[in-house]
Image (tube, rainbow, N blue to C red):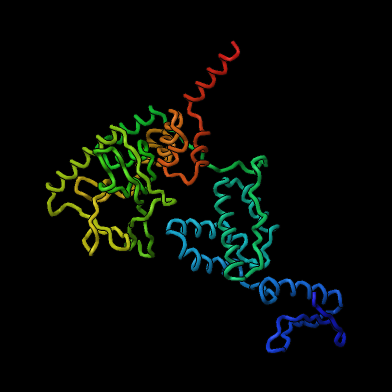
Amino acid sequence: MGISYRKRGDTWEYRFDKVTINGKRKQMTKSGFKTKKEAEQAGIKAYNEFIQHGEPFVPSEISVTDFYEKWQSTYCATNLNDITRRNYAKKINNYIIPVLGEYKLRYLNTTVLQKFINDLYDRGFSRNTLSSIKGILTSSMNYAVEPLHYIASSPMNYVNIPSKRVVAKVATRSQPHVFISKEDMELIFKRFPEGTSAHIPIMLGYKAGLRLGEAYGLLWEDIDLENKTLTVNRQVQWKDSTDEENGYWYFANPKYDSVRTITLDSELCRLLSAEKERQMKNEVKYDEYYFHYYSAPNTRMLNQDENGREVHLVCVRECGEYIQPRTMQHASSVIHNDLNIQFTFHSLRHTHCSMLLTAGAKPKYVQERLGHKNIQVTLGVYQHLTQGMKTEGDEILDSMYK
């Protein structure tokens, strides 16, 4: 291997050649070991690290807390959108730092991290949340290896989420997918009829499967009423600010960059056509007092022209004022508390997906229509049975043995 050892006084030393420059050998040497065995162990480790890294690897003394501050300000700031960064920061500050923050980064190992994941599982965290936290740990530890060279290898390489067969000490806190029945949807539309601020966004979720940000970011230029199509080109997001008054809405790519063109049914086309005609009449009626919005070069939404492109939003009030996504919080509260219907805006999307699959639509078609990241998400929704599907299955089962 080319490593030599010698005793110098009362201690031992290892030495090996790194390279020869101009006929002169450059060597790596270290002494001070009490025994030859200690020198051999250290020498072999140093030699192997030199082969891999060019120099014996020296782990960083940085704390986990300081490391995550650096990771968020470097990697996350330049690779993730605002919503993802906020979600990461929330999980780092609420879950990772309180448990691991006082460790030195180099002391994190697979055992420590596996126990961390196991403890979250036992506390009832959903598999989706565990998967997200595990993803943050994996990505950050990889970054600590390369390009930062803070640690030699990732301790997350062999960390796993506990098997579904393992019973957690606390019941999982996951929210089940909610399917809204036709009868409940009729109650919702009776409470929020055509002309109310929540009606069109709810219809876009229920009949087109749009995400919340996609529904509220929809422009009239995205809708082709003649050909009955709608193109999802963007979503709207909120940019936080330390001064709340300086926060603003802006346009971003759809989640997973899922730009797509979908077909609209006749009822939704009728609703959108009537709404567009109303808005055109209202613009004339309100004249100079009608709200106009513009998209600045940085995609910020403005209510005044600052060298931006005028955008014609679908979700606006009679005077043209933008209906913000936050209004859906009020609508959801009314539906949940007053109508006693379990509801989130995402449940509209889930219902749309379930209805298509139940009616016989191919999973691939549904995946592309809803902009799911992969087919497994679509098939996961299919696992949720409506009462009608269960009744049909029960009848088949009963008839099999007659």
Q: Position of residue 156 (x, y in %)?
A: 64, 58
Where 155 falls versus 2 (above or below)? above
Question: Which image quarter holds the C terminus?
Answer: top right
Indicate left or right for 58 with 396 as reference.
right
Question: Which image quarter holds the N terminus?
Answer: bottom right
Residue lying at 28% horizontally and 37% vertically, measured from the top left: 228
Q: Position of residue 5 (x, y in %)?
A: 84, 80
Q: Position of residue 400 (x, y in %)?
A: 58, 15
Indicate left or right for 209 with 270 as reference.
right
Q: Nearest the camera: 158 or 261?
A: 261
Where 116 falls versus 232 (above or below)? below
Q: Quadrant of residue 260?
A: top left
Residue lying at 45% horizontally and 44% vertically, measured from the top left: 372
**For the view shown, which residue lies furthest in the top direction?**
402
Residue lying at 85% horizontally and 87% vertically, measured from the top left: 8
Residue lying at 85% horizontally and 83% vertically, measured from the top left: 6
Q: Nearest the camera: 85 or 368?
A: 368
Q: Quadrant of residue 226?
A: top left
Q: Position of residue 216 (x, y in %)?
A: 32, 48
Q: Quadrant of residue 401?
A: top right
Indicate left or right for 353 with 6 as reference.
left
Where 87 falls versus 148 (above or below)? above
Indicate left or right for 360 with 401 as reference.
left
Q: How many marks?
A: 0
Q: Is residue 128 visible?
A: yes
Q: Is residue 202 visible?
A: no
